Amino acid sequence: MESDIQRIGVSLEEKLLAQFDQLIENKGYTNRSEAIRDLIREYLVEEEWRKDEGTSVGTITLVYNHDLREMADRLTDL
């Protein structure tokens, strides 16, 4: 465990806390703090992706029957 951990307080509605506790159980977290840290990290990463104006790279993978008539031509037209 990190030595620079700060303790904070969070107030939640009862229903929201019950849903969060169920998520914690389903995901196998050992405590709420661990789950909250992961959620904050995930949110911060998503925010970085959203504001990033750099180049993104991706792929599109198609699985098709190459024996079908004109399928290659139709895919090329995409």
Image (spheres, helix red, strand yellow):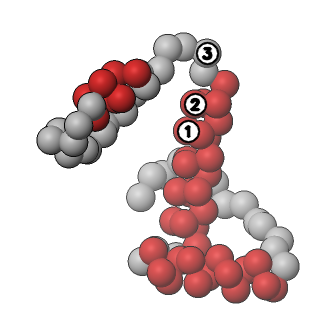
Q: Is residue 30 visible?
A: no
When the figure is inspected, residue 45 is found, relative to residue 36, above or below; the finding is above
Viewer-side residue, 16 vs 69: 69
Viewer-side residue, 35 vs 3: 35
Q: In this figure, which residue is indicated by the disc labeled 3?
A: 53
Secondary element type, mark 3: loop
Q: Residue at x 72, y 61 (%)?
A: 8
Given the image, on which type of amino acid does mark 1 rest?
A: Val
Near mark 3 (Cα within 10 A), the count class, few <14, some 14-19 or many ≥20, is few
Nearer the observer: mark 2 or 1; the answer is 2
Q: Which mark, residue 72?
A: none
Q: How many callouts does the rendering have? A: 3
Q: How far across and how far down the image is residue 41, in percent?
A: 55, 47
Q: In this figure, which residue is indicated by the disc labeled 2?
A: 49
Given the image, on which type of amino acid does mark 2 rest?
A: Trp
Q: Residue at x 23, y 37 (%)?
A: 69
Q: Residue at x 58, y 57 (%)?
A: 39
Given the image, on which type of amino acid does mark 3 rest?
A: Glu
- In this view, the residue farthest toward the top is 54
Nearer the observer: mark 3 or 1; the answer is 3
* Left or right: 74, with 7 as reference point: left
Mark 3 or mark 1, earlier in chain = 1
Disc 3 and disc 1: Cα gap in Å? 14 Å
Q: Quadrant of residue 61?
A: top left
Secondary element type, mark 2: helix
Q: In this figure, which residue is indicated by the disc labeled 1?
A: 45
When the figure is inspected, residue 32 is found, relative to residue 4, above or below; the finding is below
Q: How far across and how far down the image is residue 73, in percent?
A: 30, 24
Q: Quadrant of the C terminus?
A: top left
Q: Quadrant of the N terminus?
A: bottom left
